[in-house]
Image: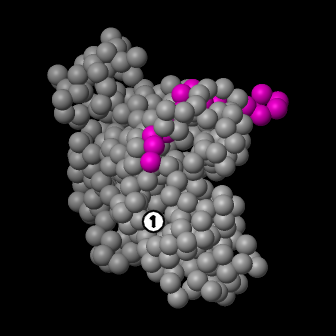
Amino acid sequence: MAAVTLEGISKIYSGDVHAVRDVDLEIRDGEFLVLVGPSGCGKSTTLRMVAGLESISAGTLRIGDRVVNDVHPRDRDIAMVFQNYALYPHMTVRQNMAFALKMRKTPKAEIAERVDWAAGLLGLEDLLERKPKALSGGQRQRVALGRAIVRQPAVFLFDEPLSNLDAKLRVETRAEIKRLHRKLKTTTIYVTHDQEEAMTLGDRVVVMSDGVVRQADSALNVYQHPADRFVAGFLGMPPMNFFDGTLEHSDGQMWFVGDELRLRLEDAPAEWLQGQPSRPVVAGIRPEALRVSEAPTDNGISGTVLVTEPLGSTMDVFLQTAAGQRLVCRVPASPLEEGKSVVAEVAPEDVHLFEVNGTGDGQSPTLYGRNLRTLEPAMA
């Protein structure tokens, strides 16, 4: 096992296309780190640079104490599990799992021992003489895992390994990967666009966008304390609701004031206004923080029920406000008619506030920010 260190890692393609920009990460020995983000965010490119399948344009990559920028993939002591399994169709499960060891000229007795050990871990003992075409998708993925495990590498790399599985198999295989990591304790870097996989698997989650690391922290901290509006909107299903407004100081209290929402913010320092009478901000509210009722409230948003989606013990309620904004609430399941007028109520402590830092292309403004509740009084 080994730590993996990325120092200022960048990938620049021809035409000055920056796929990855100045990534600094320290993956601790034995840690399970998940890279997550939308398509094109740079997560797979980052993983492929660690694997040696992509050259590094700038920065330093270390596995353990060794700089591996120019080291061939086969000499990096890593094992990679791909999205498409990459099994040899003419080989049996046993032969597929043994292939890398055979290429290394590992003694036959040791190969047999390692393959049997990995097959036992993954429940593949009865499938060792089958060929891939005789296996289900979940079984093929377990064989791909076994092929990586038998190598006993310093680092495991996973590139969206569950994307081709159905929902039930994804859950089962996800649990299998987590169980294996707890048993083997091998340093693991895992790439996915699925936020549920990221939240459930990772010791730490790294959220990426436009080739940049937006936040790296435990899954719970990333969810509860998002570093900016992108992270807040990306993690969470359904996604966070956002409301434009201003931060104002009145009657000795700080307030968020929007077209349809006015909230008194407890323990908010006046320094947040930076000496101005008011300041534009964005309020973010997670769907599960909203409560739906028919009674008016000071901390509520009036709206009309567009549709409800039952989820068993809970349901998602989609509302449209008088100003035409749509929001979603996740609430306990109950009868609620479409077209009904209701109020979505939120507690002030469940609101995230974000700075307004940019206007994007002028047509679809992009608001990036930081959760003001976590800042020092003097903001940058």
Task: Say which residue appears at 60% left-offset and 65% top-offset.
Answer: 107
Q: Is residue 1 visible?
A: yes
Task: Say which residue appears at 72% left-offset and 78% top-offset.
Answer: 91
Q: Is residue 9 magenta?
A: yes
Q: Main secondary structure of the magenta part?
A: strand
Rendered position, 43 above or below 106: above
Name the foreground residue: 222 vs 48: 48
Q: Which residue is mark 1?
A: 177
Name the foreground residue: 127 vs 302: 127
Q: Is residue 98 magenta?
A: no
Residue 201 picture location, percent across and down = 41, 58
Dot 1 amino acid type:
Ile
Secondary structure of residue under mark 1: helix
Is 158 left or right of 206, judged from the image as shown? right
Segment colored magenta: 1-17
Is 159 left or right of 65, judged from the image as shown? right
Rendered position, 195 above or below 358: below
